[in-house]
Amino acid sequence: MTKYSEVSTTINRRRLLARAIELAGAGAALGLPLLGPAARAQTRTPPVAAGAGGGPPGPSALPPGTHLVLLGTQAGPGVSLTRGQTASAVVVDGVPYLVDCGYGTVRQLTASNVGVARINTVFLSHLHNDHTSDLVALFAHQFTGNKATATEVYGPPGTEALVRAAGEFLRADVEIRTVDEGRTNRTDRLVHGHDVAAKATPTLVYRDERVTVITAENTHFPESAKQRMTHRSLAYRLETKDRSIVLSGDTAYSKNLVELARGADVFVCEVMAQSAYDRNMEIAKADTEAGRANSVARHVAESHSTPADVGRMATEAKVKTVVLYHQLPGQRAANSLDTSAATFIEGVHTQFAGDVIVGQDLMVL
């Protein structure tokens, strides 16, 4: 693994077109529809390929190459009984790289057969709890599972302190099990956090023999808040030998993200229902008139992407396929048309003519 400061990437358009065709074939092989303009209203739940025990395929069951496993697609911070908070695994030749670790991630890693023991590298988009709350659970289960190799966690400023605090949280458990059970592994000491500088231009932060990871600051925190805190929010691009996958993190429309995603095969982007945007703008206006300029409603309205925003970024970046995750408010309001998969797709297609997939937990692409 090598760290770098900055990198500029040149996209080979012909190679990317071949990748998009490959992706379409792989999706069809797994029974996953690519929802283009002719299928905008399609809302059925796509199946995933079965692995051992009838569940989704684990890394060893997947064919060689790059696969995206959506572990959790529900926007937080609310807890759903049927869906996990934001987390995704990019599996490259059987090796998973975890991007975000919201509540329910450990359960979803188990359900997907990716498993917790194989996770050695984690990337955090930002430090809201719906993207980090299962980190302690991940480390704890790696410890009790006798994982001996280090887990490296990369993220915006504050990540190193967060990971160190998670290790401290586990100290009592480790001490008890060391004395009482004779354990010798110390996973609490084998978790390392790395702060990544948030930059407007694409910046290379990680590379190994399978993947190159580039990041850029997105637009989740307003300038007024950034002036009073060091916390930032990141998007990630993972480049492998056969695929380029960009994960937006939480963000409003972002020029930095457009540049990071330019020419990508798969653009995994958060989405907020237009009705949720409209409602939060109404509440934020009332809050402001009442002297509460900083409010949850304002944050939600100003720091997330409507379907049209997603489509605009996808078109400007000339990506091949859009996958929607961190869905706000998701499909919890199942009887409301404007939070349905069809309406999300329709909204994206007002600005983007390519394929759109509404992500669901444990979907494999």
Image: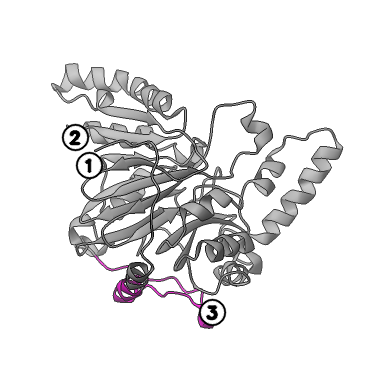
The image shows residue 120, relative to residue 44, as above or below, that is above
Q: Can residue 11 be seen in this view?
A: yes
For mark 1, give the secondary structure. Answer: loop
Q: Name the residue under label 1.
A: 117
Identity of the residue drawn at 52% across and 39% down: 233
For residue 218, what is the image quadrant?
top right
Q: Which of marks 3 and 1 is in front?
A: 3
Image: magenta residue range: 21-50
The image shows residue 349, relative to residue 52, as above or below, that is below
Amino acid type, callout 1: Ala
Few, some or many residues within 10 Å of mark 1 (<14, 14–19, 20+):
some
Q: Residue 147 carries which label?
A: 2
Measured Cα–Cα span from mark 2 to mark 1: 6 Å
For mark 2, give the secondary structure. Answer: loop
For residue 346, what is the image quadrant?
bottom right
Percent of width and height locating residue 124: 42, 40
| 219 in magenta | no
Percent of width and height locating residue 245: 38, 57
Percent of width and height locating residue 151: 27, 34
| 39 in magenta | yes
